[in-house]
Image: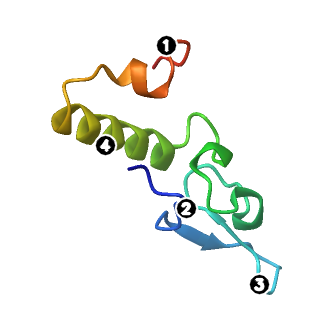
Amino acid sequence: MEPKFWIDYPQEHIEGEMYKYRCSYCKIETTAINGLIENHEEDCTFRIEQEKTYRQTISQKSHIDVNQIRGADETD
């Protein structure tokens, strides 16, 4: 099962802001990401690696094609 929230990504403090942080890879603010993997940039290293790991886990646990799970229109 895919996690509902992805909060284990590396974050960095936004300079000049008291309580604002962002993803260290794609630089999107944590409040904009809101725990959702799809709110990271499409080319974000964290997002790419997590989606890759998730797909590998699913394909190892099942013989179902990953495209059937995610939708055939969603490809790498």
Which is more foreground, mark 3 or mark 4?
4
Of residue 32 and residue 5, the one placed in the foreground of this image is 5
SS at circle 1: loop
Question: Which residue: 47% across, 44% down?
Answer: 45
- The residues bearing labels 1 and 2 have C-alpha atoms spaced at a distance of 24 Å
Residue in the image at 20% along x and 32% along y: 62
Mark 2: give few (<14), some (14-19) or many (20+) Cα within 10 Å: few
Tell which circle, 4 or 2, labels the residue nearer the N-terminal end: 2
First in residue order: circle 2 vs circle 3? 2
Which three-letter amino acid code belongs to the residue tagged 1? Answer: Ala
Q: Distance between the residues labelled 2 and 3?
A: 21 Å
Question: What residue does disc 2 label?
Answer: 5
Amino acid type at circle 3 is Tyr
**32 horizontally vs 56: left or right:** right
Q: Which of marks 1 and 3 is nearer the N terminus?
A: 3
Name the one closer to the observer, 27 or 31: 31
Q: Around disc 3, counting alpha carbons within 10 Å, would you say few (fewer than 14), some (14 to 19), or many (20 or more)?
A: few
Q: Give the colour scheme of this rendering.
A: rainbow
Amino acid bearing label 4:
Thr
Residue at which label 4 appears: 53
Q: Residue 72 carries which label?
A: 1
Q: Quadrant of residue 68?
A: top left
Q: In which quarter of the image is residue 35?
A: bottom right
User: Which badge, 1 or 2, comes first in the chain's sequence?
Assistant: 2
Residue picked out by circle 3: 19
